Amino acid sequence: MPPSADLIVENASMLTMDPDTPRAEAIAIKGGEIIAIADRATVLEHKGSGTRVIDAERGSVVPGFIEAHMHLFGGAAELDHLQLMGVHGFDALCDAVRNYAAKRPDLSVLQAQGADYTILSATERVSRHHLDRILPDRPFVMAAPDHHTMWANTKALELAGLLGGKRLGPGNEIVMGDDGLAGGELREGEAFGPLIALAGEERVRLGLATGGEPDPKPTPAEQASDRAIMRCGLEWCARHGITSIQNMDGNLHQLELLSEIEAEGDLLCRVQVPFHYKNFMTLDMLDKASDMAERYAGEWLSSGMVKMFYDGVLEGWTAVMVDDYADRPGWRGEPLFTPEHLAEVAVEADRRGLQVTVHSIGDGAVRAVLDGYEAARRKNGRRDSRHRVEHIEVVTVADIPRFAELGVIASMQPPHPPGAMDFPLEPTLSRIGRERWPLSYAWRTLKQAGAHVVFASDWPVSPIDPILGIQAAVLRKPWAEGDPDQSFSLHESLAGYTVEGAYAEFMEHRKGRLKAGFMADLVVLSADIEATAPEALHTVWPVTTICGGKITYQA
C-alpha cells in the first residue's frame, strides 16, 4: 500500500527540470518531501483520507524559485517607501513626492526608491536645489534603483551633518557644488549612510554598511519590530513563488531574527545569510564567518558564505574598469579593496572552506576577483569551492574562460541590462562605450564558455518577480546590429532560477528540481508558461507557493 500523502497537486503541466522525468501530471508530498511525481493515476494512489488535493487547472507547476541574489531585510523595509520607478520629469517627481509627504505627516525622514539617474532629463542631474523646490521644510532623500547613489534635499543634508562635506574612504563620494557645499548627490554607502541613520533604519542596513551588529543591542520592542520587517519580506517572497533566498548582505542579527521566526514556525522561505567582510576588517574577523557557518547549517537557515564588494556601479562611475570610462577619459573607478587585499581575504576564506561571493560590476573588478580566486586555488589546492562573481556587467574576452577553468559561478540579473526591463539605456550605454557592448551582461557568452550562470533579481534593486526576470532574459535584444545575442530560452531562464540556484548553494541533490526524495518546494502558476507567448509572460503569476510541503502563499 503506497504511503498516504499530506498534499497532492494534480491536473498540472509540470516542468520538473529533472532530465530523467522532465514531464509529469501530478506530485505527491509527505513530511516536507516529494514522494511521487508521475501521471495522475499513479500519484493518486497516494491519496488518503487526510490528503489535501490542489487542482492546478493545467497551469504550470515548476520547482520553487531560488532567488540567488537579493537583500531581504532592506528590501522589506523599503516596501513602505515612495516608489519612483517609471516617474520622469520634474513635475511628475514633484507630484509624487508631495502626495507621499501629505499622507505621512509624522515621518521624520521621507524616503523614496527607484529614482532613475535620468529622472529629470537625459542631461540634467538631480541636485539638492531641485529637491528643495519640491520639499524645502522636511528632510527628503531618494535612492537610485541600484542603491549605490542617493540624493538629498538641504534639510536632510543639514540634519545628517553632510552639507559641508565629509572625508570618506575609497570609492565613496559626496559630490560638492560650486558653492563649497554638498550638491545633493551622494555616491556609495559611506556617503549616504548618515541619511539612513537619520531615518532610523540603520539596523536594517547594517548587513550592508558595516557587516557588524546593532550597538547597543536592540530592545525587545526593537527586536520585535525588526522581526516584523523580516516577516513582511518573507511574505513578499512567498507571494512571488520564491522558496529559497541567497541573501547578499548579512550579519548575525539577521540570522538571529530569522531563527526566532523559524522557532515560531513562520519561516516561509529557506534563507542563506552571509558574513559581510568589509575593507576595514582584519582577517581574524573571518572567525565570525566560520562561527556563523557552524551555528547555521540547516536546510531552512544557513550561512557559510562571505560576501564582499569590490566596486560600485557604472552609472555613478564607481564600477572598476580595465580601461577608461567611455564618457570620462582618465577615470577607471576606485576599488574598495586592492587586488592584493582581496586575494588575501579570498585565500583565507577558502582555506576555512567558506564560499566567497564578490560584487564585481566593471571588467576591472571581475578580473581582480578572478585573480583572487586563482590565488586561493594556488595556495590551498583545488576543491569544489563554487566561489561567485556577482553582476559581471562588463567582462573582457580574456576573462571569460576563467570562470569554467576556476569553477566560478557567474551570478547575473536579467532585469539589469538597460532596456531589458525597467532601467533606461542611458547613462549606462555611454559609460560602457560601444566597443564594450558585446561583452556587457554577457549571459550566453559565459554559459557557452562553460560557466554556471545563476539568475536573480537583486531585489530591491529590481522587482522581485522571477517571472518578470525570465521574460527579460527571453526577450533580451542586442543594443546594436552585429552584437551577440545574449538571450536565454524559456527553459534556460527557468533553470537559472531553479537548477542553477540550487547548485550555487551546494544543494543540487535536494532542490531545484521536482524529483522523488527532493524537498517539496514548488510553485503552481496561473497558466501554462510554455504555451504563453514570451511577450505575455508577465501575465502569469503564482497561484500557490509550497515550501517544505507547507503552503506559504495562496492567491
Image (cartoon, rainbow, N blue to C red):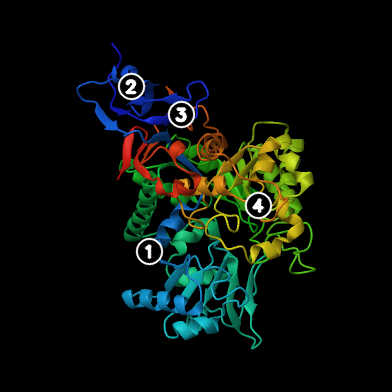
Q: Which mark is residue 16?
A: 3
Location of mark 4 (residue): 478
Q: Nearer the viewer, residue 118 or 340?
A: 118
Q: Residue at x 51, y 42 (%)?
A: 303
Q: Residue 240: image x %, image y %?
A: 40, 47
Location of mark 2 (residue): 40
What separation in Å lies between label 2 and label 4 (alpha carbons)?
Answer: 43 Å
Q: What residue type is labelled 1?
A: Asp
Q: Is mark 4 on a helix, strand or loop?
A: loop
| Quarter of the picture holding the N terminus | top left
Query: In screen coordinates, is 459 left or right of 326?
Result: left
**Mark 1 burial class by Cα count in 10 Å: few <14, some 14-19, many 20+:** few
Q: Which numbered disc flags the more N-terminal residue, 3 or 4?
A: 3
What separation in Å lies between label 1 and label 4 (alpha carbons)?
Answer: 35 Å
Between disc 3 and disc 1, the foreground one is: 3
**Mark 2 burial class by Cα count in 10 Å: few <14, some 14-19, many 20+:** some
Q: What residue type is labelled 4?
A: Pro
What separation in Å lies between label 1 and label 2 (alpha carbons)?
Answer: 43 Å
What separation in Å lies between label 3 and label 1 (alpha carbons)?
Answer: 36 Å
Between disc 3 and disc 4, the foreground one is: 4
Within the image, what quadrant is residue 270 found in?
A: top left
Q: Do the residues labelled 1 and 2 touch (CB within 8 Å)?
A: no
Between disc 2 and disc 4, the foreground one is: 4
Q: Do the residues labelled 3 and 1 touch (CB within 8 Å)?
A: no
Q: Which numbered disc flags the more N-terminal residue, 1 or 4?
A: 1
Query: In screen coordinates, is 21 left or right of 8?
Result: right
Location of mark 1 (residue): 80
